[in-house]
Image (tube, rainbow, N blue to C red):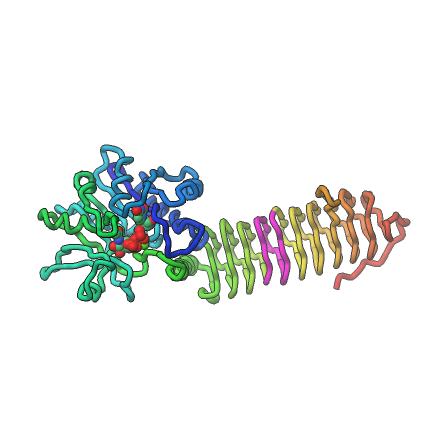
């Protein structure tokens, strides 16, 4: 959208959060508060975004990592002062300026669009977003005259009891006529506290006969500003509710949305089923008809179609189709699991590739390993991958059969179709088709053995 730009205010200290992390960087459903605002503006077609930073500016700039232009407000002398600083960095051709608060992350793109339209329509120099929250305390109140037009916004700290009674509040999100804003921003007087309130522009506009348009948020909670941890938790709840609704509309079963925690960037295929007490975070993708939970946590991972992850943790890994994991397994970062595998009760895997149809049941640890297809890992198998200084790899060929309680001292390689006996401590490579037993494991003849039964 040419001629349109946004100034996002994120320079305040956020004292009420009582946090070392800048307020606007607190995460909500897997994304920093500030990033929700920037994403929503972009979705509304407002690509030119200037973020005003100040308190903890280095940290906020580092987190933005070039995703938006930043300008510094030093010292922080209020919201009008912040906008003044932001305006200096907008292109001369800018006609409409949206001002958004870095601590109001739930404002949807559609409302930014309505503000742009309301300001462009008629002679309004300001269009502002208002709402009727259940508890208006902390917000600036809208004061209207008898015919309903807005006269002023009065900050709570300056409001008399009559004004405090008013239930309509200022969300802190606006669209301004750029020329009017440029001409008037520096004239906003300092309040007794020394801050310059952006909200004073409303009375200034009205006093010169200009019109101020109001867009009312149909749902007050979407206009909320987050000032403390309790506000943060409330916003998280609302956002998670919206995310769950979106997935359910797309054909995902979420058995209990109130106990399912799904980050905003997670993708879930049709007919997947999210059982209670599950957490899907980061950039996770869940395939169609997969079942996650009860009680599973999947972080930055890809889970294939029809795969079941039951009471388990999967981190930064890729799991194929028709896999069964758990209960009580842990895939640590860097695992790639082929289709049709079974990863059993109490298995831990790290940086391990597992070929199609392999089975890793009961109490095993595989770290830095490459498994071929149709490998069977017996109960209690361990890769001793760490010699105290460096990690070493283990490779196990297609169709190998690793007996219960085998210890594989890496680096070591088990050939395709090879077998190890129960309790073998394998310190040397085992050629294809051979069987080793004992401690340290030694080769035995090629006598035929009855297939071991995996209970
Ligand atoms: C502000 C509004 C209030 C509105 C509420 C909505 C003013 C004076 N008040 O109050 O009418 O109801 O938001 O949530 O605007 N900031 C800066 N530089 C500064 C001061 C603040 O960038 O010098 C930023 C903050 O980082 C924050 C935003 O502006 O993201 C709002 O500041 P905050 O102190 O939270 O304002 P409120 O008291 O909530
Ligand atoms: Ca605020």
Q: Quadrant of the C terminus?
A: bottom right
Pick the front one: 24 or 426: 24
Q: Where's residue 292, x and y in %?
A: 54, 60
Q: Where's residue 252, x and y in %?
A: 46, 60
The boundaries of the magenta stretch are 311-333
Pick the front one: 415 or 100: 100
* Residue 171 seen in this snapshot: no
Q: Quadrant of the N terminus?
A: top left
Q: Viewed as shown, does residue 444 lie left or right of 132?
A: right
In the rendered image, the residue lying farthest to the top is: 92
Q: Where's residue 157, x and y in %?
A: 24, 59
> How many numbered circles are shown?
0
Determine the residue positioned at 43% across, 54% down.
Answer: 19
Give the image quarter of residue 6.
top left
Pick the front one: 44 or 372: 44
Determine the residue positioned at 11% across, 47% down.
Answer: 210
Determine the residue positioned at 22% across, 61% down.
Answer: 168
Pick the front one: 443 or 145: 145
* Residue 321 is a magenta residue: yes
* Residue 223 seen in this snapshot: yes
Give the image quarter of residue 324.
bottom right
Determine the residue positioned at 65% across, 54% down.
Answer: 341
Q: Quadrant of ligand 2?
A: bottom left
Quick check: 94 above or below 197?
Answer: above
* Residue 270 is a magenta residue: no
Q: Viewed as shown, does residue 309 lie left or right of 217?
A: right
- What secondary structure is the magenta-colored segment mainly? loop
Q: Where's residue 309, x and y in %?
A: 58, 59
């Amino acid at each position: 959208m040419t001629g349109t730009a946004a100034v996002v205010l994120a320079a305040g200290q956020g004292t009420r959060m009582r946090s070392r992390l800048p307020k606007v960087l607190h995460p909500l459903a897997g994304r920093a508060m500030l990033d929700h605002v920037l994403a929503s503006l972009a979705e509304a077609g407002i690509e030119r975004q200037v973020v005003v930073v100040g308190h903890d500016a280095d940290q906020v700039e580092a987190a933005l990592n070039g995703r938006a232009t930043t300008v510094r407000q030093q010292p922080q002398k209020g919201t009008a002062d912040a906008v003044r600083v932001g305006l200096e960095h907008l292109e001369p051709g800018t006609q409409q300026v949206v001002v958004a608060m870095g601590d109001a992350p739930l404002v949807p793109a559609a409302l930014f669009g309505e503000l742009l339209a309301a300001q462009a329509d008629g002679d309004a120099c300001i269009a502002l977003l208002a709402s009727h929250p259940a508890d208006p305390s902390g917000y600036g109140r809208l004061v209207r005259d008898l015919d309903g037009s807005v006269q002023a916004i009065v900050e709570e700290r300056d409001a008399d009891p009559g004004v405090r009674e008013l239930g309509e509040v200022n969300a802190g999100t606006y669209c301004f006529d750029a020329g009017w804003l440029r001409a008037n921003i520096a004239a906003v007087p300092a309040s007794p506290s020394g801050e310059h309130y952006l909200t004073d522009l409303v009375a200034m506009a009205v006093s010169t006969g200009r019109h101020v348009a109001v867009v009312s948020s149909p749902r007050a909670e979407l206009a909320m500003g987050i000032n403390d941890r309790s506000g943060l938790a409330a916003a998280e709840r609302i956002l998670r509710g919206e995310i769950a609704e979106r997935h359910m509309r797309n054909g995902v079963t979420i058995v209990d949305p109130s106990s399912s925690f799904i980050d905003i960037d997670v993708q879930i295929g049709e007919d997947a089923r999210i059982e209670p007490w599950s957490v899907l975070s980061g950039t996770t993708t869940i395939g169609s008809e997969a079942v996650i939970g009860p009680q599973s946590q999947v972080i930055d991972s890809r889970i294939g179609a029809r795969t079941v992850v039951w009471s388990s943790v999967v981190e930064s890994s890729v799991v194929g189709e028709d896999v069964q994991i758990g209960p009580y397994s842990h895939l640590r970062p860097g695992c790639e699991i082929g289709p049709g595998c079974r990863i059993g009760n109490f298995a831990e895997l790290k940086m391990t590739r597992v070929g199609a149809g392999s089975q890793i049941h009961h109490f095993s640890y595989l770290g830095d390993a490459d498994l071929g297809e149709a490998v069977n890992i017996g109960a209690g198998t361990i890769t001793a991958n760490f010699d105290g200084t460096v990690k070493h790899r283990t490779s196990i060929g297609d169709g190998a059969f690793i007996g219960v309680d085998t210890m594989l001292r890496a680096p070591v390689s088990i050939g395709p179709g090879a077998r190890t006996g129960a309790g073998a401590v394998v310190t040397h490579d085992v050629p294809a088709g051979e069987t080793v037993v004992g401690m340290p494991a030694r080769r035995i003849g090629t006598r035929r053995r009855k297939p071991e039964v995996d209970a």
